[in-house]
Image (tube, helix red, strand yellow):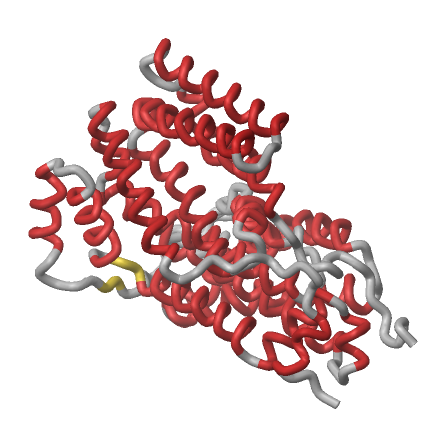
């Protein structure tokens, strides 16, 4: 027997996650632009919603989104993937090696192949040998760092422009855009109109000087949604993460699908590392991932193990990173006002609509405290500014944890025939 779409009800969770309708996404995006526009008008900080900041957000979000997408593939098949950071590290080296010896497109292939090797090792440890998923992932992160360091010294140390800790400059991937609209959009952005200027800035960021790898990453997000939620193959993968015993009784080769999913996870995370090497910095550098694999994992959890949520979470973390790089303490300080309003609103909603008095009271108290900090200060210290993306990760996961539902069999050791 084979598992088909018609059998989904046999392996679906008893309380499936509520799906967000398609029309809610553009409405949510419009709400974000309205909020940013209001903060810009109140504080006078234009960098908070400029096309430069939004363009940097898109570039900084893509490695996180690819890592989060890799985590989604693995965990939807029931394998926790803490090793995303290590797979990204391998991808940075693979991208540099491939680009130096075969051009920029071979850099993409090299990143995915090296990341896939890391995924295959993780699958071998967890699926075949039954190693604890967390232990395997942490070990992979440690080993990958050492392997990449050794390979960099071995292959880049003697090259002109290279060293033991970095590669020579890499050939660039093509960049694309829609000609003839950048200047008109810039003119509208400079008018400072409420919402309209923010919309123009967003359109300009999304249509000007985009790396081809950014477009590939966005297509991979859409493709993942279609493949995992609209095909029998995707149903089989997800069944391995929900109930592998039930999937086995329906004829699914659980081991095979777990191997495929975890290897694909490594390839996507490796591509995220390749993005850092080929687009973000144009060279391999030791430790250039800087914990982005963990933030990608956080984006996946925030996104409730769904591609659209991964993109949204990555965009949030990328925006905070872009804001602290471009606007510094003043821009982060302006954002405190928005954070205060959102926390107070969330707390009141928890109290009045959900009757969750403890959580709601805590959210309101924190929101009021953030508002007081905004009023009594004029900027944010540099140390806090640099920590802003990581602090955002912690806060978002803390407040989003109540609505999350991971795959039911995620992280559990599976052995063939155990249901008989």
Q: What x and y, as percent, mark residue 295?
A: 54, 44
Q: Nearer the viewer, residue 314 or 95?
A: 314
Going by the picture, which residue comes out furthest to the right? 420
Q: What x and y, as percent, mark residue 133?
A: 75, 55
Q: What x and y, as percent, mark residue 232?
A: 60, 81
Q: Work out which quarter of the rendered image holds the N terminus and state it.
A: bottom right
Q: Nearer the viewer, residue 139 or 238?
A: 238
Picture residue at 66% right of the left edge, 51% below the top: 82
Q: Is residue 363 visible?
A: yes
Q: Where 292 sits versus 362, above or below?
A: below
Q: Nearer the viewer, residue 336 or 63?
A: 336
Total marks placed:
0
Q: Where 42 sits versus 23, above or below?
A: above
Going by the picture, which residue comes out furthest to the top? 376
Q: Work out which quarter of the rendered image holds the C terminus and state it.
A: bottom right
Q: Is residue 208 left or right of residue 90?
A: left
Picture residue at 76% right of the left edge, 82% below the top: 250
Q: Where 325 sits versus 250, above or below?
A: above
Q: What x and y, as percent, mark residue 275?
A: 42, 57
Picture residue at 25% right of the left edge, 62% below the top: 175
Q: Is residue 93 visible?
A: no
Picture residue at 49% right of the left edge, 60% below the top: 307
Q: Is residue 342 left or right of residue 357?
A: left
Q: Nearer the viewer, residue 373 or 66?
A: 373
């Amino acid at each position: 027997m084979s598992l088909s779409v018609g059998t989904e009800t046999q392996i679906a969770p008893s309380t499936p996650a509520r799906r967000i309708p398609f029309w809610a996404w553009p409405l949510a995006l419009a709400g974000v632009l309205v909020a940013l526009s209001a903060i810009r008008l109140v504080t006078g900080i234009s960098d908070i919603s400029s096309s430069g900041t939004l363009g940097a957000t898109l570039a900084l979000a893509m490695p996180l989104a690819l890592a989060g997408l890799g985590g989604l593939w693995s965990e939807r098949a029931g394998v926790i993937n803490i090793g995303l950071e290590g797979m990204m590290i391998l991808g940075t080296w693979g991208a540099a090696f491939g680009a130096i010896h075969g051009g920029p497109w071979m850099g993409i292939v090299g990143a995915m192949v090296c990341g896939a090797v890391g995924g295959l090792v993780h699958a071998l440890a967890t699926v075949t040998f039954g190693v604890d998923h967390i232990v395997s992932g942490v070990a992979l992160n440690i080993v990958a760092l050492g392997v990449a360091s050794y390979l960099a010294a071995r292959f880049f140390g003697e090259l002109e422009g290279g060293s033991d800790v970095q590669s020579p400059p890499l050939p660039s991937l093509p960049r694309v855009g829609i000609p003839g609209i950048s200047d008109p959009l810039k003119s509208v952005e400079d008018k400072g109109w409420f919402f309209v200027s923010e919309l123009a800035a967003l359109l300009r960021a999304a249509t000007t000087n985009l790396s081809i790898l950014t477009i590939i990453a966005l297509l991979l997000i859409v493709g993942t949604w279609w493949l995992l939620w609209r095909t029998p193959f995707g149903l089989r993968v997800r069944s391995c993460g929900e109930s592998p015993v039930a999937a086995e009784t329906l004829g699914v080769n659980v081991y095979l699908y777990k191997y495929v999913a975890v290897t694909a996870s490594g390839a996507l995370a490796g591509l995220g590392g390749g993005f850092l090497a080929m687009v973000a910095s144009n060279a391999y550098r030791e430790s250039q991932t800087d914990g982005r694999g963990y933030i990608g994992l956080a984006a996946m959890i925030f996104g409730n193990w769904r591609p659209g949520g991964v993109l949204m979470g990555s965009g949030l973390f990328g925006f905070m990173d872009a804001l602290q790089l471009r606007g510094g303490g003043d821009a982060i300080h302006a954002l405190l006002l928005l954070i205060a309003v959102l926390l107070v609103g969330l707390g009141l909603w928890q109290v009045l609509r959900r009757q969750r008095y403890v959580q709601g009271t805590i959210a309101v108290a924190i929101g009021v405290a953030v508002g007081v900090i905004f009023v009594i200060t004029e900027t944010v210290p540099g140390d806090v500014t640099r920590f802003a993306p990581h602090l955002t990760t912690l806060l978002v996961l803390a407040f989003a944890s109540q609505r999350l539902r991971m795959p039911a069999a995620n992280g559990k050791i599976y052995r063939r025939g155990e249901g008989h």
